[in-house]
Amino acid sequence: MLIIPAIDIKGGACVRLTQGRMDAETVYSINPIEVARRWEGLGASLIHLVDLDGAIGGEASNYDVIERIAASVNCEVQIGGGIRDECTADKYLNIKNVKRIILGTIAVENPTLLATLAKKYPQRLAAGIDAKDGFVAIKGWVNVTGKRASELATALEGKGISCIIYTDISRDGMLKGPNHKATCDLAGSVNIPVVASGGVSTLDDVKAYLGSSVEGVIIGKALYAGAINLEEAIKAAGC
């Protein structure tokens, strides 16, 4: 199982939000490049980068910072936040070390574009399914739709998606543990690989996913708060 450290970027800085609220941020570093190098040095083979400003504004607000981060490490990165047109997708997927991009809003609002990009970039797209009370939230988690997360996941079958990144918004940044059952249920219901995100706060939370069909775990605030040691998490996951 893959352990993926997260770097969320707002105004060029590395921050963490509580339940995705832009007014509830903690700044952990004004130099996200140093943070990325730290996670790589501790054994990360993939880093999760999110443009928070882009997720809200709908455009690549922190593109230059993300490009520099990707160029500064030798491991791969995945990128999400504000990728809502083909031009932006092209720009990100041509950056050095980018493994895949994460599409959330597009997956709901523009399935035609999703299909176009999946054909153009086979297995280089991840679908970000962010859920609140089981319903998909889009546009930086601001808008909660009437579509259930399980419904969207099923609709993505056979669309060329490399994985689903599933986040329970209510758990994100709370350090109260993930929604293990909902994540495992989703992973067991589709053939697309699922990566868990949101709420992982202890090493036991990581171990709880071992033996399930979840293929990876994204860890954010727990790393920055010192609640989880990245090297220990990677070792526990068998990576």
Image: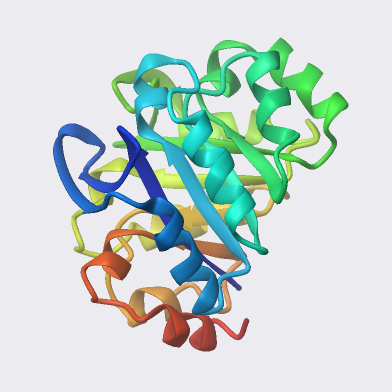
- Which residue is drawn at the image coordinates 46% and 84% (left, top)? 231
Name the residue at the left extreme: 24
Q: Is residue 134 visible?
A: no
Q: Quadrant of the N terminus?
A: bottom right
Residue 42 percent location from the top left of the image: 49, 79
In this orientation, which residue lies closer to the viewer: 150 or 21? 21
Say left or right for 26 vs 92.
left
Q: Using the image as rendered, state which of residue 36 and residue 17 is in the foreground.
A: 36
The structure residue drawn at horizontal position 39% and vertical position 20%, both measured from the top left corner, is 139
Q: Quadrant of the C terminus?
A: bottom right
Residue 45 placement, left or right of 197:
right
Residue 190 appears at what percent x and percent y? 66, 47
Find residue 197 and report its image quarter.
bottom left
147 or 143, which is in the foreground? 143
Q: Is residue 10 visible?
A: yes
Name which quarter of the figure residue 219 lies in. bottom left
Q: Position of residue 115 (x, y in %)?
A: 77, 20
x%, y% of residue 229? 35, 81
Left or right: 216, with 162 as reference point: left
